[in-house]
Amino acid sequence: MRFIHASDLHIDSPLRGLNRYEGAPVERLRAATRRSLERLVDKATSEQVDFVLLAGDIYDRDWQDFHTGLFFREQMVRLGRANIRVFIIQGNHDAQGVISKQLALPPNVTVFSSRSAQTIRLDELSVAIHGRSFPDRVVDEDLVPSYPDSVPGFFNVGMLHTSLTGRPGHDPYAPTDLSTLIAKGYDYWALGHVHAREVICEQPRIVFPGNLQGRHANETGAKGCEFVTVEAGRIEAEFVPLDAVRWNQVSLSLTGVDQLDALNGIFHEAMEPLLIGATDRMHAVRITLTGSTALHQTEAAQPGTLAAALQAAAQDLSEAEVWIEQVRLELSTPLDRAQAALRQDAVGELVRLVDAIAANPTELLGMAQANLGDLLGAMPPEVAVGDVPKLDNIDELKSLLLDAEATVLARLAASAEGI
């Protein structure tokens, strides 16, 4: 017996703010959740699996129109034509009380009830699948005690959309714990809700497969499904990547690097391990540049220089398509601050002022709030998310202060008053 376990498809999840990135492959990114499901169906049909388990959050929200539902239904029809059954529980994003529009699904698809837990027996496989859908977005109770007992002599699978005892970045829905899951006596727990793949336990096997497609720069790495083979009660499972766009975060140290041309090699070296076995998909990359480098002053004199150099380096990668989503700077200028502070000129005055402000967090917070508070507060949410400094984060404000210092130093150097 073989089956696929996937979760958190979030089909047509809205990707806000992409239009502010010039050259962003907007349509490719928006179509990624659909393409990943098509890849899942391709895998299921080519391997002729016995069934597919989808453990919640098929959709991201209520449909704007019927196109989202029709696309999903079309993929289920493809599975039906291959005689593959599909079992679905609804999670917090696609609960009964969230999705208002309805389409009848093909007969090969079973959606578990939201009123009570139930068991579907596949007698020809000696498999019992137990599950329950969310009735509404918020489910605070532990659903596991209400699940039916395991069926003797059968391979028992439990489907549950849950946060377990809590996971960072995920709302605490249908909370439960490992001992409660084990006590049900099931052989496999097909979990959903958590977007990072996590094998909770091997005996019984309890798994979060993660979401099928990363949706932004914080959902990094390979995304896909669990491909499970059961023979004589023994489970063999492998993770199968199915993402159409892979998000990566890369940190590059530029300490001691003073030539712009060196960025090409540094970037290619960092990307090489990420592209192994994954050249058949687009890679969206967020880069953070760190360290003490003369290029910080180059960037200050002509903002955008480093990002452009990295975008050019991405174009030179022949083995894969790479889009630079964002370049973040955590750089400093190689300056002997103690010596510079002794100077009796504009440079010395600037360094002393910056050191004084940085040494007084209260003053730094006050200045940031007074000068940036109204501006940041007026930003649209889709622009502000993740891309602007937090006015209560001292480290971010100090970095911003040093960036400002580098800009002034570059202007002083350009006017022949520099170092």
Image: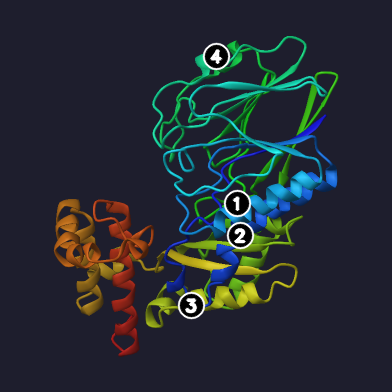
Residue 150 visible at all: yes
Question: As rendered, which of 414 and 364 lies closer to the eye?
Answer: 364
| Residue 209: quarter of image | top right
Horizontal placement of 205 versus 370: left or right?
Answer: right
**Which quadrant is the N terminus positioned in?**
top right
Residue 332: x %, y % from top left: 39, 65
Q: Earlier in the sequence, mark 2 or mark 1?
A: 2
Q: Earlier in the sequence, mark 4 or mark 2?
A: 2
Q: How far, Cα to Cα, is label 2 from label 1?
A: 7 Å
Residue holding disc 1:
213
Residue holding disc 4:
179
Residue 261 lies, with reference to residue 209, above or below; the image says below
Within 10 Å of disc 1 (Cα), the crowding (few <14, some 14-19, many 20+) is: many
Question: As rendered, which of 104 and 393 lies closer to the eye?
Answer: 104
Q: Earlier in the sequence, mark 4 or mark 1?
A: 4
Residue holding disc 2:
32
Q: How far, Cα to Cα, is label 4 from label 3?
A: 50 Å
Residue holding disc 3:
22
Q: Nearer the viewer, mark 3 or mark 1?
A: 1
SS under mark 2: helix
The reply to whether dot 4 and dot 3 touch (C-beta < 8 Å) is: no
Residue 394: x %, y % from top left: 27, 52
Within 10 Å of disc 3 (Cα), the crowding (few <14, some 14-19, many 20+) is: few
SS under mark 3: loop
SS under mark 1: loop
Residue 299 lies, with reference to residue 90, above or below; the image says below
Q: Residue at x 70, y 60 (%)?
A: 272
Q: Residue at x 18, y 55 (%)?
A: 365
Q: Amino acid at mark 3?
A: Glu
Q: Amino acid at mark 2?
A: Ala
Q: How far, Cα to Cα, is label 2 from label 3?
A: 19 Å
